[in-house]
Image (tube, grey):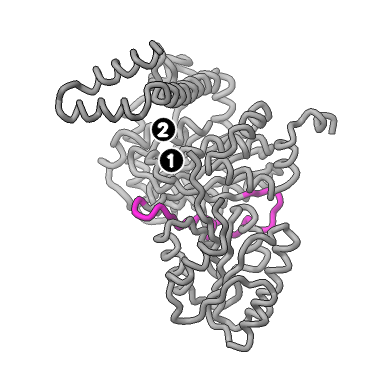
Amino acid sequence: MSERKIRVLVAKPGLDGHDRGAKVVARALRDAGMEVIYTGLRQTPEMIVEAALQEDVDVIGLSILSGAHMALVPRILELMQAHDLADVKLILGGIVPDEDITALQRMGVSGIFGPGSDTQAIVEHIRKVVPLE
Amino acid sequence: MSETPTLPPIVAAIRESRRALARLLTRIENNAAAADLAALYPHGGKAHLIGVTGAPGTGKSSLVNSMAKAYRAEGKTVSILAVDPTSPFSGGAVLGDRIRMRDLHGDAGVFIRSMATRGNLGGIARTTADMIRALDAAAFDVILIETVGAGQSEVEIASAAHTTLVVEAPGLGDDVQAIKAGILEIADILVVNKADNPGVESTLRALRAMLDLGHRAERIMHHGQLMSVPAAAVVGEDEAWQTPIVQTVATNGTGIGGLLAKIAEHRAYLRESGVQTLRERASLNAEISERLRELLLARLIERVGVARLQALIERAILREIDPSSAAALLLAEGVQE
């Protein structure tokens, strides 16, 4: 019997130490029946993409509160391309100023969820963008 | 590269590309890789499979991390399969073992995969054995399998691994915990981790007392049944493996060298005593029988029809027929047609 589960890597790149949001999202995704690989704090872009490759995830969820998203996200997308992970969806949570949102979406970020986002909206977004054959 | 032309495409692919290996592991987990598994089976059997089990909080992930580093220093390639529980309510899981394995990042000789139990209760998932076969065919020298934080009966790892480590830590349980049946009986090596913590002496004393009480058991087939028998009956009193106790501090690497030496000793024992062959025969017998049972059941239900099964269930509810007679009736009807 084949049963496919959506697998999501939840990672916190950069140097800020606030992982409350990432943990809340990890739990919400678990409660929605997904398998969440939680990698913890202070991950480099290289670590995140390597983990995503080994774990064969459908989605990478990043939590960035440090304001470094305009440096970290392009680097992660570049590494994803290089490792043939272009089909993996990238979503972003944390503090992202409005003026950056369009730029990030244009780079290829699939969803952006700022403070106060409903976790159910994240679940629904993932279900929408991950094809379950 | 003289053997390259004879390799099936899937084996060549997973040895070449980590992405291909990762994708194969997903297909196996989703029960959609029967043909691949058949193709790669002849190309495995070389890796040493080491199971790491024990109660939550004993430091299994940190120990696996330190062991992997030490094996890498010996020049061996390592893959890690880390199993965490699936929530029985949502079917989802949070797999967090990678948090303690970050030292291994950036090393092409290491491959880490997290997996959820997906409803299985034995400490590993139903597909774990097949995942191990894929990693084995991918030609890793050592495969470390970390089970869920197990209590006393999550002992399935012993049939999936060659060498089973049971990890304990000071301050987690008293002497009575140590003599409870189950998980300690499957230990090929007992590891007392966090050995720099207070209370380590009493933990060691309790474990030694437990080992003195019982003799080592080996798992072999006897009259078609998987059984535990005293090791001495299999290999003789002198050659039987004596479960050693190894002290480690995984977070700073203390004792890891000694642990790897004991694991190597156990591997040599398994080979020289012939116990490895006995165990393999036992676990293959169990696996083939299990698969056969599934196939026969599916075939029979297909023949008699689900409706017929339902009808007999209804009659059993009314106490018109007992479950064994219902099964015998279904078999008779299915075989007759």
Tell me the chain of label 1.
B
**Residue annotated with mark 2:** B186
**Which amino acid is tagged 2?**
Ile
Residue type at the position of mark 1:
Val
Whole-percent x, y for residue A132 in the image? 54, 53
The front one of A129 and B279 is A129
Same subunit, tags 1 and 2: yes
Q: Are marks 1 and 2 in contact (CB under 8 Å)?
A: yes
Can residue B124 be seen by looking at this rendering?
A: yes
Number of marks drawn: 2
Question: What stretch of residues is rendered in magenta?
Answer: B88-111
Circle 2 marks a residue in which chain?
B
Task: Name the residue that disc number 1 marks.
Answer: B166
Counting other residues with Cα less than 10 Å from the Cα at mark 1, is it few (<14), some (14-19), or many (20 or more)? many
- Check disc 1 and report its element: helix, strand or loop: strand
Q: Nearer the viewer, residue A102 or B164?
A: A102
Residue drawn 54% across the image and 41% down it: B259
Q: Is residue B153 magenta?
A: no
